[in-house]
Image: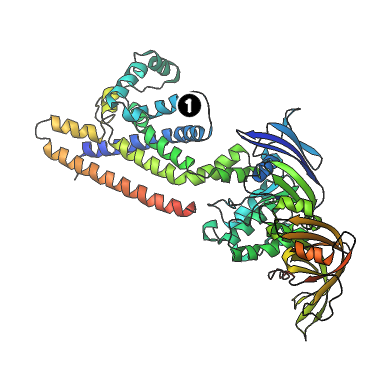
């Protein structure tokens, strides 16, 4: 199942011209600042917005082609849409909300699938409640379940976390991660938060003023100096896909392995072999030309420099390759000169801090 | 307590009002949904015309009915001849007049409650596979229910009090078109009828109070149902 979109639309003054395609199951983030046209694009894919020009193909079916005068109405598109404000039906119980799309699906999912989604999202205890009696996080989970149960061919998530406070976000993240890891369908995840994108997305589509300016896998995107210019630099860094390798409970540490080496993090409640995504901010990576033997930091990785870019008046961003993993280190220009950094040069990267999201615990089955 | 003639006037009033409200209700719902959601040329004029009975003198409405549906008017004659329906000087004519006069009460209340429904909910339903009739039945109607019930009860109470349009169109015939207000008027016209007029007026006040209380009660119950 894939989505490919070519959309042109004018909103008196604001112009959208976006071309992109996502092919694989997993989460593709539509990333950009507010007003970059993200919501309009997902609305066009859902059929809630009719672009003045363009074509949209979902799983081989053309749902929009302005030249051929094809417009498939939203109710026939089989696209699950999770709105920012949940949009639950206030007069129906949670169960009837969940079954709304399920009952109307051309191929209705099995009752077992209903129960699976309910337990995946932890909704068992909420089924009889009315939406007015739910917390923000619970509403988001119900909206997610309602969309998933409509047997969609693709899922659109329009900033599903934006209306939630940090604690509620933390409540939803594990469900979304689990959804991504078990995904059988492509998901377009609209966000203006780099944190969310780094944590959830497999692929990033960067939007700026209604245009797609970049599209790349998340692991490359965040460590790519050219692309990071589009993402707004303050919090860019590296996203690394690791596996839990071993635990050293006596020291209170866990070892994570990735193809460029190992990372040491505070003890995690995760079984060995589990996948875990970690982030390392550019500001948290120091560089050394020689192997630092007497240093308190646990995470010292041998890397090679792939690119150097000066940023602002003082700093330089250094892109590093460690195995297949890419990092960025933000150091001062003076330091870069002192170390004599140049492409292909081997350096030791010292990660002062590895971000393992505290909520990234396994979701209870 | 009440004399047979007074009781007759009370029952007639209730019947005329019930028929008027129930017949006008589906039309009010359909037009309210149409005007709340659709855009079409001349919408403002249609909207204005639907509110007209509220601002026109009821006597004018009665007069217009008389010249269109009276037995000697073409439309009235046709209805009588081909369908056997007679409005003139009949209680059905009184119901028609009351229904028209109180139509804007229902229409306005229903339209406002439909417009108050978040359009995003309809969009969500569309992405979940619901067509327009499906959305109307399963979202619009239940969510507008507070407005529908409040509008119907208000219109019913207003029907009980309708005077000008009824007396102009269908006259003041005991047992046929003499509703409570007409009975009060007749009592005042006859010598020694003050006591009867007072009793019937008290009855009207009691009915109005019951109506208002019911509307309030139903509104609260239904809001709980609609999850607001």
The answer to whether residue B225 is visible is yes
A86, above or below A65, in the image:
below
The chain ID associated with circle 1 is: B
Q: Nearer the viewer, residue A326 or A139?
A: A326
Residue lying at 82% horizontally and 81% vertically, measured from the top left: A294
Q: Quadrant of residue A16?
A: top right
B90, above or below A116, in the image:
above
- Which element is circle 1 on? helix
Q: Position of residue B4 (x, y in %)?
A: 22, 38
The answer to whether residue A26 is visible is no
Apparent side of residue B107 relative to residue A364 in the rendered image (left or right): left
Question: Colour mode?
Answer: rainbow
Q: Nearer the viewer, residue A69 or A7?
A: A7
Q: Nearer the viewer, residue A178 or B61?
A: A178
Residue that protrudes farthest toward the left in the picture = B192
Apparent side of residue B151 relative to residue A127 in the rendered image (left or right): left
A298, above or below B30, in the image:
below
Q: Position of residue A76 (x, y in %)?
A: 70, 40
Q: Nearer the viewer, residue A193 or B116?
A: A193
Residue that protrudes farthest toward the bottom in the picture = A250
Which quadrant does the C terminus of chain A fall into?
bottom right
Q: Quadrant of residue A307?
A: bottom right
The residue under label 1 is: B43
Apparent side of residue B216 relative to residue A142 in the rendered image (left or right): left
Q: Position of residue B127 (x, y in %)?
A: 66, 44
Q: Position of residue A134 (x, y in %)?
A: 55, 61
């Amino acid at each position: 199942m894939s989505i490919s979109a070519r959309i042109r639309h004018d909103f008196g003054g604001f112009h959208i011209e976006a071309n992109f395609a996502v092919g694989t199951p997993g989460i593709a983030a539509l990333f950009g600042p507010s007003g970059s046209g993200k919501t309009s694009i997902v609305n066009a894919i859902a059929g809630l917005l009719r672009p003045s020009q363009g074509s949209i193909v979902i799983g081989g079916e053309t749902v929009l082609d302005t030249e051929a005068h094809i417009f498939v109405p939203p109710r026939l598109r089989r696209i699950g849409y999770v709105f920012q404000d949940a949009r639950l039906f206030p007069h129906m119980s949670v169960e009837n909300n969940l079954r709304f799309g399920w009952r109307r699906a051309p191929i209705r999912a099995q009752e077992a699938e209903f129960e699976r989604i309910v337990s995946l999202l932890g909704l068992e205890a909420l089924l009889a409640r009315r939406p007015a009696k739910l917390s923000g996080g619970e509403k988001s989970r119900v909206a997610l379940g309602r969309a998933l149960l409509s047997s969609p061919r693709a899922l659109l998530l329009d900033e599903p976390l934006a209306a939630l406070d940090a604690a509620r976000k933390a409540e939803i993240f594990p469900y979304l991660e689990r959804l991504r890891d078990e995904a059988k369908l492509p998901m377009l995840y609209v966000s203006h938060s780099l944190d969310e994108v780094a944590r959830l997305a497999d692929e990033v589509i960067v939007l700026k003023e209604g245009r797609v300016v970049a599209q790349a896998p998340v692991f490359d995107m965040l460590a790519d100096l050219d692309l990071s210019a589009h993402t707004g630099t303050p919090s860019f860094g590296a996203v690394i896909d690791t596996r839990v390798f071993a635990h050293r409970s006596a020291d209170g540490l866990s070892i994570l392995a990735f193809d460029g080496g190992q990372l040491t993090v505070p003890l995690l409640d995760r079984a060995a072999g589990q996948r875990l995504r970690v982030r390392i901010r550019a500001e948290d990576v120091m560089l050394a030309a020689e192997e630092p033997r007497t240093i308190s930091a646990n995470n010292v990785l041998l890397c090679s420099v792939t690119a150097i870019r000066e940023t602002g008046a003082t700093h330089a961003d250094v892109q590093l390759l460690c195995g297949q993993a890419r990092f960025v280190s933000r150091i001062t220009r003076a330091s870069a000169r002192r170390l004599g950094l140049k492409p292909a040069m081997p350096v030791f990267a010292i990660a002062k801090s590895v971000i393992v999201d505290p909520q990234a615990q396994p979701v209870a089955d | 307590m009440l004399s047979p003639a007074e009781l007759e006037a009370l029952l007639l009033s209730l019947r005329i009002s019930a028929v008027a409200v129930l017949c006008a209700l589906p039309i009010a719902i359909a037009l309210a949904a149409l005007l709340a959601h659709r855009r079409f040329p001349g919408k403002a004029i249609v909207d204005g015309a639907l509110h007209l009975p509220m601002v026109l003198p009821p006597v004018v409405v009665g007069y217009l009915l008389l010249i269109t549906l009276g037995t000697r008017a073409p439309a009235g004659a046709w209805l009588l001849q081909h369908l056997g329906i007679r409005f003139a000087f009949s209680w059905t004519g009184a119901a028609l007049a009351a229904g028209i006069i109180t139509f804007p009460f229902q229409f306005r209340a229903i339209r406002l409650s439909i417009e108050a429904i978040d359009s995003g909910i309809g969009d969500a339903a569309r992405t979940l596979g619901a067509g327009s009739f499906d959305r109307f039945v399963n979202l619009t109607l239940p969510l507008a229910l507070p407005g529908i019930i409040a509008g119907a009860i208000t219109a019913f109470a207003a029907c009980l009090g309708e005077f000008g349009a009824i007396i102009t169109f269908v006259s003041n015939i005991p047992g046929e078109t003499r509703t409570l207000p007409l009975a009060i008027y007749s009592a005042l016209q006859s010598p020694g009828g003050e006591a009867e007029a007072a009793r019937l007026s008290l009855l009207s006040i009691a009915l109005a109070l019951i109506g208002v209380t019911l509307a309030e009660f139903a509104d609260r119950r239904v809001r709980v149902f609609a999850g607001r």
